[in-house]
Image (cartoon, rainbow, N blue to C red):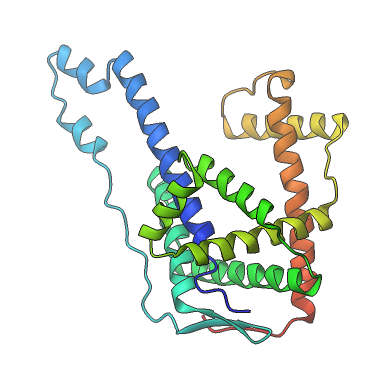
Amino acid sequence: MNLPKKMLLSLLIGASVLVTAACSDTEENAANEEETPTEEQATEENGETAEGDAESAEQPEMPEPDLEGVPDVVAEVNGEEIIKEDFEAAYTAQFQQMAMQAQVSGQEVDQAQLKEQVAESLVSQELLVQETANRDIEATDEEVNETLTSLAEQNGLASSEEFLTALEEQGLSEEEVMEQVASQVKVDKLIAEESGEAEASEEELQEFYEQMQAQQEEMGGEELPPFEDIEAELEAQLVQQKENEAVQALVTELREDADVTVHI
């Protein structure tokens, strides 16, 4: 099996969603700022200098991902190679997200650690893709088209045709995209097989809510809304958590029997 740039589609989707969310947050913050006077405005009204506030408001420069020394073959999984191109695409997407978070927290991104994490993530993805082939899991044309339409909607595009055009501008042909979407559909089916019909009981949801509430209090954050108001969101998070645990358990099992070499 050789899917060129097989990881790039999910990364482009993730990056697009990230950008959309960032733009949405920016617009919301801007709207709030229009309604509420800024500290700088208040200071100027009082006849005081706003120079210190202006300096503190300056955004730090976004750091660049360190891709020096990445080998041509980053890892081998049961004879399948994870190449430099796929790693760099994955690493850059993850780094950009981490760098945005670092600007808020003031913590620098540990690039050495992030490289290891991305390499391991790519190995895990390859193990899952290979397992779909071992189990003869297939993806129908209808499932692929439905997923493509859903991805287009998630990224704010009117149709799958627009989505394909956007990805083509990023260097992916329609054939590559369809192969990758089919691959993702198969992995989704594999995850469904492993996690079964993941559900969250009322008792589990209450316990999850109390844990989150305790964390908020410990961090000095705002009090959570009433349980009834966020029950649906809690259920979605808990089900996702259970699915992730099932996937991680499968990856661990597959890794034990796999021939994996990581060169980074």
* Residue 109 placement: quadrant: bottom left
- Is 120 left, or right, of 96 in this rendering? right
Q: Is residue 26 above or below residue 243?
A: above
* Residue 64 placement: quadrant: bottom left
Q: Is residue 19 above or below residue 99?
A: above
Q: Residue at x 74, y 61 (%)?
A: 248
Q: Is residue 261 above or below residue 115?
A: below
Q: Residue 256, image x and y in percent?
A: 78, 78
- Is 90 left, or right, of 75 in this rendering? left
Q: Residue at x 42, y 50 (%)?
A: 102
Q: Residue at x 63, y 73 (%)?
A: 123
**Where is the N terminus found, in terms of image quarters?**
bottom right
Q: Residue 50, image x and y in percent?
A: 16, 26
Q: Residue 107, image x and y in percent?
A: 42, 52
Q: Residue 223, image x and y in percent?
A: 62, 22
Foreground of the two, 149 or 2: 149
Q: Is residue 90 above or below residue 57?
A: below
Q: Residue at x 58, y 43 (%)?
A: 150
- Is 140 left, or right, of 73 in this rendering? right
